Amino acid sequence: MRPDSSYQLFVGLDRSDATIDTHALAPDGAKAHQQKISTRPERLLDWVGALRRAHPDGRVAVCIEQPCANIASFLGQFEFIDLFLVNPVLIKAYRDSFHTARPKDDKKDAACVALFLMERHAALDPWRPASAEMRQLRAYLEHRRMLVDGVTETTNRLTAALKLYYPQALELSGKNLGAPLACRFLERFPDLETLKSAAPDELREFYYANASRRRPAVERRVAAAAAAVAITADDAIIAPQRELALFLVKQLDLLRAQIARYEELVAGIMAAHEDAAIFESLPGAAQNLSARLLATFGDDRTRHPAPESVQRFAGIAPVTKQSGKKRHVHRRFTKRTCPHFEHQTFIEWAGQTILQSRWARAYYEAQRAKKVGHWAIIRALAYKWIRIAHRCWTDRVPYDEERYLKALERAGSPLAELVRNAA
């Protein structure tokens, strides 16, 4: 839906941590006013109130560069404001078109944003937030992913510490340092001296009590502990690194507990949502990725009326550059042009489908045989899967692999032949 062009005011905002520069233009391009306001909610409310009093019966268009989640959330609650969120890349290109020297100033940037909005508003869509349930789901999933990355960072730090004073723990505590077994091992045996003082039966009892019951593996670890030799006897190294290791173990326990809490909250939303079954039916989606796909598509089907909308939004659609006889197709520069979380969702999901979908596996192997790079194939798969997921979402039907393969056969798709040859 395009916005009404009869705005009484076009306002450009340039935000910093503490202040916002505003620049307002009348529909005829005349400067209305320019001011600097605080980002405190009380001052923002005063500023919005002044806008409403100055334009009691009309609508106001406001534009700001992304990301600006807090400002967008605040301004989105006022009915008379149409908010436009613009990629900073667009504003930078627009600003640079006026000055070859590329000067930058907060007041001038706000004026540039206002002018951009006045000139281009008819071609832009005003920001429309997703439902509260979808925004909550996305936040839970983003926070969970942040904590998963935190586990990786913490285990890397723990690995570095153990290599300095206790490298045997890397083998004896299991393959995954972030797992409960490794944390309990380091709590019980925080250094080699403590480990060497433990009897073999004590070690066996520990492993069996912590769900490590494969007898050959347990005996191998007991023998490795008996033969272990200290990498250093310098207490100036051992004591500080041991303290750090024990702290990181506590941190890992907290991270795992909160990740489990987020997964519980996500599962609650998914269990109650009518579209959850659609995304849970997709190959390789499982619990986490199916929730991320639902949060990306949302429950408002007017936001993405065609699969191309999702492909561009997530940075999966390629970019074509053509001039004269030259034509070049390349991937999008996702850090600048699309939300990273959504792009990551589709890339990770496409990678999982290779293990779960017959046609995806056949396509991947055929492309690898042509010497196509792994990530290029993954992006191409994501592009195809978005079209399928969008159709399922639009029609409100779960994905059926056999039905899709039959459709490929009827259409005479080369993919159908690849699947037959792979069978």
Image (cartoon, grey):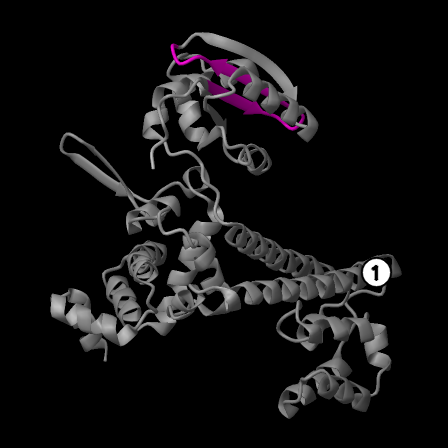
> Along the line of sight, which residue is nearer the eye, 416 or 210?
416
Is the stretch drawn in magenta largely helix, strand or loop?
strand
Please provide percent x and percent y for residue 215: 65, 92
Residue drawn 34% across the image and 57% down it: 382
Q: Is residue 107 visible?
A: yes
Please provide percent x and percent y for residue 229: 77, 74
- What amino acid is labelled 1 in the image? Glu
Helix, strand, or loop for circle 1?
helix
> Along the line of sight, which residue is nearer the eye, 264 or 167?
264
Looking at the rendered image, the quarter that the N terminus falls into is top left
Please provide percent x and percent y for residue 125: 38, 34
Residue drawn 30% across the image and 67% down it: 360
Find residue 417 and report its image quarter: bottom left
Residue 131 lies left or right of residue 304; in this view the side is: right
Please provide percent x and percent y for residue 331: 33, 45
The residue stretch that appears in magenta:
10-28
Residue drawn 37% across the image and 61% down it: 350
Q: Is residue 103 visible?
A: no
